[in-house]
Image (spheres, rainbow, N blue to C red):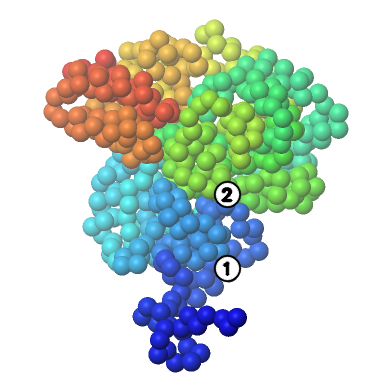
Amino acid sequence: MAPLDTKPSGAPKGVWKSGKGKGRHTPKGRQFTDEAQAEIAALLGDRPRRRDLLIEFLHLIQDAHGHISADHIAALAVEMRVGQAEIYETATFYAHFDVVKEDEVPPPALTIRVCDSLSCEMAGAQQLQKALEDGLDASQVRVLRAPCMGRCDTAPVLEIGHNHIDHATPEKVQAAIAADDTHAHLPDYETFATYEAEGGYAKLKELREGGDWEKVQEDVLSSGLRGLGGAGFPSGKKWGFVRMNEGPRYLAVNGDEGEPGTFKDRYYLERTPHVFLEGMLIAAWAVEAQTCFIYMRDEYPAVLEILRREISALEDAGIVEKGYIDLRRGAGAYICGEESAMIESIEGKKGLPRHRPPFVAQVGVFNRPTLVHNVETLYWVSKICRKGPQVLNSVEKNGRKGLRSYSVSGRVAQPGVYLLPAGSTILDVIDAAGGMAEGHVFKAYQPGGPSSGLLPASINDVPLDFDTLQPLGTFIGSAAVVVLSDQDTARDAALNMLRFFEDESCGQCTPCRAGCEKAVKLMQADKWDQDLLEDLCQVMGDASICGLGQAAPNPIRLVMKHFADEI
C-alpha cells in the first residue's frame, strides 16, 4: 500500500511549511548574550553548580560588576539550571545585591553606606549623610542609609566600598575617595601559628583521640554557659538533642550579628579567631557534624578575610579536611540572625524564618539535624574545655554566676566591649565604660538591643543577665547596651528602633509586616494613640512567626510605661 500524501495541495516537492514559516531562532523566554554567559562561566570557574551556592555566586557577580544585570541572571539561570524568577526573588531579598533591569541604569561604581542605628544617629549620622549627599557627585558616588554595622563604639560609622571609616566625617570620606581606599583593613590578630604555639588545638586533638563527648557536655552545662546570641538556651543541652537524631548531622555558626548595638562577636573574631574556631570544632566533634557552616554577616569584610585565611591554615595543618569548614557570606538581612532564616540562607534561598516545630536540631541544614551556636558561645566552649567550667561558674556577683560581654555605646566616655560579671547593673556597665560622656546626664538605657526596648535610669539596680529583666517587660538579649542622656528623647529612640524593624521585617507574616509599618506611622504623631498602639503590640506579639515581630513592640510599651510625659 502506497504511503498517504500529507503535503498540502500545490506545495513544492520536498518542502513542508506551516504557519508563517518563520520558526524560532531562540528558546522561549528572556535571552542572554554570549558575553554574559562567558562572564558567568569565568566567575564560577570550576565551582560545583549547587543550588545552595546561589548567594555565593550572586556575590561574585556583584563584586565583579558592581551590580547584577538581567543578562547575568538569565545566564546564571542556565548555568545553574535554576529558574530566572527564583534567582531574581533571592537576589532582591538581600540589601547588598543591586539587581538592574534591562531598562535601568546601573548604580555608580562607588557606594557609601551610612549607618543609621541608634548609637550612630545620636552621634550625628543623619547630618553626616546629608552632608555627603550634598557634597558628592551622585553620578559617581551613591550614598545610602544602612542598618547597624557592628561598630557602635566608633559612631558615626560608614562603609565606603568595603572600607569602614570610624568617627566618620565628610573630610575622611573625601580623603578615602582620593586615595581609592575602599577595601577592608585587617587588624592585627592572633594567627594559627601563634595560637598553636601557645597550646591551641591540643585540647581538640586530645578529645578526638579518645574524649568523652558527654563529659564535655557536662562541663559546658556545669559552667552555666547559655546561648549568647540572645536566646539564652543552656548550651550543652543542644548537643544531646542533636546527637539523638540519626546522621548525617551539621553544625551552623550564627555569625549574623545584626542586632543594633551589638559588636562583641566582631571584637573577639578580630583579635582571637582561633579561640572561636577551636570551640566550634570541639562542638562539631561532640555531635559528629559532617560539615561546619559559618554564616558571617557581609558587614564584617575584615572578619570574613581573617576567617578565609585561618581556615586555609587549618586545612594546610591537617586539622580539618579541605571543605569541612564552609564559610558563607551573608548579604545584608537582619532576619538571617534568626536561626531557621539563617539556614534558609545557607541553602541559597530567601531568609524566611521557618514554622516550628520541627526544630533545627531535628530538621536543619538540608533537612538534617543541625547544631546552631552563636560565635561567642563557641568562644566560651573553647575556654571551658581548656580551663574547666570554673572559668565561668567561679565568678559571682549579685547572686548571678558567670561572665557577660557587654557591647556598650551611646553617651558613655569610652564605648567598647567590656567583660564583666553577669550580675553587673547598668551603673557597673557605665562605670566600666569610663562613666557618662562629658556634659551628659544618665537618662535611659537599652539593655539588649532594640528588641529589648528602653528602661529609665531609675531602674539601675537590676543585674543585666538572663531571667532578671523579664519581670520588667524586657530581656538581656545580646547584651547590647546603649546609654541615653538628658540630651536624647526616648520617643525618638523608640522610633529609630521601629524604623529598623520596619525595614528588616522579611514580610512573610502580616502581623509583623503591616504592624511595624503601622507602628512607625502612629509613633510619628505629636501625641501617641496609646490604646491603638497597645492593640497593635498585642497582635504582633501573639501572631508573628518569629522573634522580630514578637519583640518589636517592646520599645513602644516601655516608652508608654516609663516615658509617658514624652508622648
Identify the residue under disc 2.
Answer: 52
Place of residue 57 in the rendered image (x, y in percent of width and height, measured from the top left): 54, 57
Outermost residue to the bottom: 12
Place of residue 522 in the rendered image (x, y in percent of width and height, measured from the top left): 19, 29
Q: Residue at x 62, y 16 (%)?
A: 224
Which residue is nearer to you in this view: 357 or 2? 2
Q: Is residue 386 visible?
A: yes
Identify the residue under disc 1.
Answer: 41
Give amino acid for label 1.
Answer: Ala
Which residue is nearer to you in this view: 82 or 133? 82
| Image-quadrant location for residue 536 | top left
Outermost residue to the left: 526
The local secondary structure at tag 1 comes to helix
Place of residue 151 in the rendered image (x, y in percent of width and height, measured from the top left): 44, 41
Give amino acid for label 2.
Answer: Asp
Please identify the quadrant where the C terminus is shown.
Answer: top left
